Image: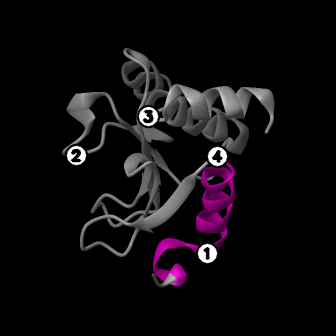
Amino acid sequence: MDENEYGAGAFERLRQICMAFPEAEEEPFGGHTAPSWRVRKKIFAMGGDGTGREVVTFKAAPGAQEVLVSAAPQRFYRPPYIGHKGWVGAWLDASDIDWDELAALIDESYRMIAPKRLVQQLDSGR
């Protein structure tokens, strides 16, 4: 993937967050150049969604999408194709990215996707 196409600074920070999880793997999604992060072949975060902007999408707890999008539409949105399943998109080119909040939301997504054993491993700090 051409990091200039995605935004090297935001991409690298996002990569560091996602690859810190147990058994996390990075690979392109389908025929796209944007990365996806997976655990045991299941996606917990994806970069890019065809909007032409720098974004990451992640799985959210029931009701979280509505709360995030209504509270901060300049930072969060309902992504096409997967938004109806509760996934949330975050603009990585927004001027007010809260990286700690974004890391916590991706952590939650990972926990909803990963096997319980890996979540326990994460909680125990191994």
Q: Nearer the viewer, mark 1 or mark 4?
A: 4
Q: Earlier in the sequence, mark 1 or mark 2?
A: 1
Q: Secondary structure at mark 2?
A: loop
Would you place residue 65 above or below residue 76 in this image?
Answer: above
Q: Residues within 10 Å of mark 4 (few under 14, many from 20)?
A: many
Mark 1–mark 4 distance (CA, rounded to whole Å)? 21 Å
Q: Nearer the viewer, mark 1 or mark 3?
A: 3
Give the residue drawn at x 24%, y 40%. 82
**Magenta-drawn segment:** 3-20
Task: Identify the residue position indicated by label 4 in the image.
Answer: 21
In depth, the one of 120 and 14 nearer the eye is: 120
Mark 3–mark 4 distance (CA, rounded to whole Å)? 12 Å
5 lies left or right of 126: left
Give the residue drawn at x 73%, y 27%. 123
Residue 50 in percent (x, y) is at 27, 63
Marker disc for residue 8: 1
Give the residue drawn at x 48%, y 73%. 6
Which of the colour schemes (rainbow, by chain, secondary structure, one colour) is used? Answer: one colour
Residue 44 in percent (x, y) is at 45, 43
Residue 87 in percent (x, y) is at 35, 35
Mark 1–mark 3 distance (CA, rounded to whole Å)? 26 Å
Marker disc for residue 113: 3
Q: Secondary structure at mark 4?
A: loop
Mark 1–mark 2 distance (CA, rounded to whole Å)? 24 Å
Residue 79 in percent (x, y) is at 29, 43
